[in-house]
Image (cartoon, rainbow, N blue to C red):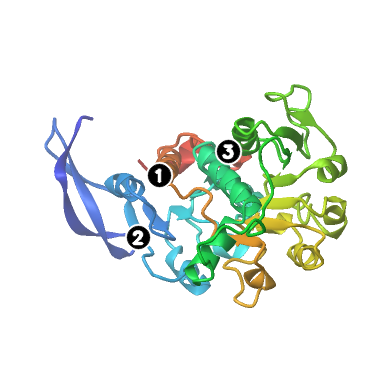
């Protein structure tokens, strides 16, 4: 059948599944007969950059939560009920309760590389395909990690506040804002995947000695541009800066805790752009208070947003960013496009470009999810 679809499509209200629905009308060129195209229903939990929404809207009926505040749990449960596809962000907890509320759901695509907010096992049992966005945010996150490292070492945020408060009198003070040198310092990288290696590449420009540890020792056999593998304890004790780049899991929960922090030099600084719960935040606060650690640069926290009463907010030797590791215009646009492509692929009955749970196809064949 050769289909001729109006452009823009002809939209009519027709009776579908015991209710009136907005549908699109196509026409068979040979016979001239019209028929209804039932478009997949997609819910997006937060407005994402162009071209993500535009790509989805061409093929699906898309509902976007556009509120100024985070989507409330009850609104998520209500909005997902009749949806075939879901686009979510790390702030959304996609657990059994959400999946129970969405019996028609075929695919979940998260606007992130992290996926600890999704019950992957439960989704897989139900044959729900999950897409995510690895790769496209590697350089942006590595840039931010290195920016936090330099800013923490050279006390840039503290200096900015000092100047804005009118405390700087304009004369040279040999003891003012003395920081730590990054040049030829030792950098310990915990987690040596795409982002960890990208940070190592940037460290080369500062002639840093790079040590790395990976829980899976993925690349330990082959040095990465002069880097050297160490076990975690050795790395922590030898490093002037430690940058965290492991995904969050049960195995990495509080990977850096009180014991690990005590192994670090009192002049060392800790950088985290991965997930907040990889570090025991209470232990970090105590180490900073006791001067057992010189400083920290953080983009992620155990609870987000950071509690207004958190002691971290009152510490001069800590730089705090609002989870902006991927926040460049180019990266966020690429993430939006990849998220949309992942979802559209699943709704066409194809494998998502970045497919987190291929085992879901053992429960529901890709072809069974085809709607486009």
Q: Quadrant of residue 284?
A: bottom right
Residue 191 visible (yes or no): yes
- The quadrant of the image that shows the N terminus is top left
Which residue occupies 33% across, 55% down? 62
Mark carried by residue 63: 2
Point out the tag, 3 or 2, that comes first from the N-terminus. 2
Q: Kindly report which numbered mark, 3 or 2, lies closer to the viewer in this rendering.
A: 2
Q: Nearer the viewer, residue 40 or 306?
A: 306
Mark carried by residue 361: 3
Provide residue 41's location: percent of width, then percent of height: 37, 54
Residue 274 visible (yes or no): no
Q: Secondary structure at mark 3?
A: helix
State how far apart marks 3 and 1 are (Cα). Answer: 20 Å
The answer to whether residue 152 is left or right of residue 47 is right
Point out the tag, 3 or 1, that comes first from the N-terminus. 1
Provide residue 269's location: percent of width, then percent of height: 72, 52
State how far apart marks 2 and 1 are (Cα). Answer: 14 Å
The answer to whether residue 208 is left or right of residue 39 is right
Neighbours of disc 2 within 10 Å: few (<14), some (14-19), many (20+)? some
The answer to whether residue 193 is left or right of residue 33 is right
Above or below, comparing residue 216 to residue 37 in the picture: above
CB contact under 8 Å: marks 2 and 1:
no
Q: Nearer the viewer, residue 210 or 29?
A: 210
The answer to whether residue 130 is left or right of residue 293 is left
Q: Kindly report which numbered mark, 3 or 1, lies closer to the viewer in this rendering.
A: 1
* Residue at mark 1: 340
- The quadrant of the image that shows the C terminus is top left
Q: Secondary structure at mark 1?
A: helix
């Amino acid at each position: 059948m050769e289909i001729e679809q109006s452009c823009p499509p002809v939209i009519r209200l027709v009776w579908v599944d015991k209710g009136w629905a907005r549908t699109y009308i196509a026409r068979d060129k040979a016979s001239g007969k019209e028929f209804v195209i039932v478009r997949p229903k997609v819910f997006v939990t937060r407005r994402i950059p162009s071209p993500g929404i535009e790509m989805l809207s061409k093929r699906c009926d898309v509902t976007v939560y556009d509120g100024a505040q985070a989507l409330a749990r009850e609104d998520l449960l209500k909005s997902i009920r009749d949806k075939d596809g879901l686009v979510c962000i790390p702030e959304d907890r996609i657990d059994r309760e959400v999946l129970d509320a969405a019996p028609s759901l075929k695919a979940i695509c998260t606007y992130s590389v992290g996926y600890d907010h999704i019950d992957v096992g439960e989704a897989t049992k139900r044959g729900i395909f999950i897409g995510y966005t690895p790769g496209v945010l590697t350089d942006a996150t590595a840039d931010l990690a290195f920016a936090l490292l330099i800013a923490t070492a050279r006390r840039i945020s503290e200096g900015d506040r000092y100047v804005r408060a009118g405390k700087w009198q304009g004369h040279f003070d040999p003891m003012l804002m003395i920081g730590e040198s990054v040049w030829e310092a030792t950098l310990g990288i915990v987690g040596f995947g795409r982002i960890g290696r990208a940070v190592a590449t940037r460290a080369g420009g500062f002639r840093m000695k790079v040590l790395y540890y990976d829980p899976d020792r993925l690349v330990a056999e082959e040095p990465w541009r002069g880097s050297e593998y160490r076990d975690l304890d050795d790395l922590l004790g030898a490093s002037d800066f430690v940058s965290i780049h492991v995904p969050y899991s049960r195995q990495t929960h509080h990977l850096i805790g009180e014991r690990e922090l005590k192994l670090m030099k009192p002049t060392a600084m800790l950088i985290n752009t991965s997930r907040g719960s990889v570090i025991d935040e209470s232990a970090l606060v105590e180490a900073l208070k006791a001067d057992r650690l010189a400083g920290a640069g953080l983009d992620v926290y155990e609870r987000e947003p950071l509690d207004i009463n958190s002691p971290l907010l009152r510490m001069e030797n800590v730089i705090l960013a609002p989870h902006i590791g991927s926040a460049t215009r180019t990266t966020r646009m690429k993430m939006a496009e990849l998220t949309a492509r992942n979802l559209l692929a699943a709704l066409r009955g194809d494998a998502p470009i970045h497919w987190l749970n291929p085992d879901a196809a053992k429960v529901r064949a890709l072809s069974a999810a085809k709607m486009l």
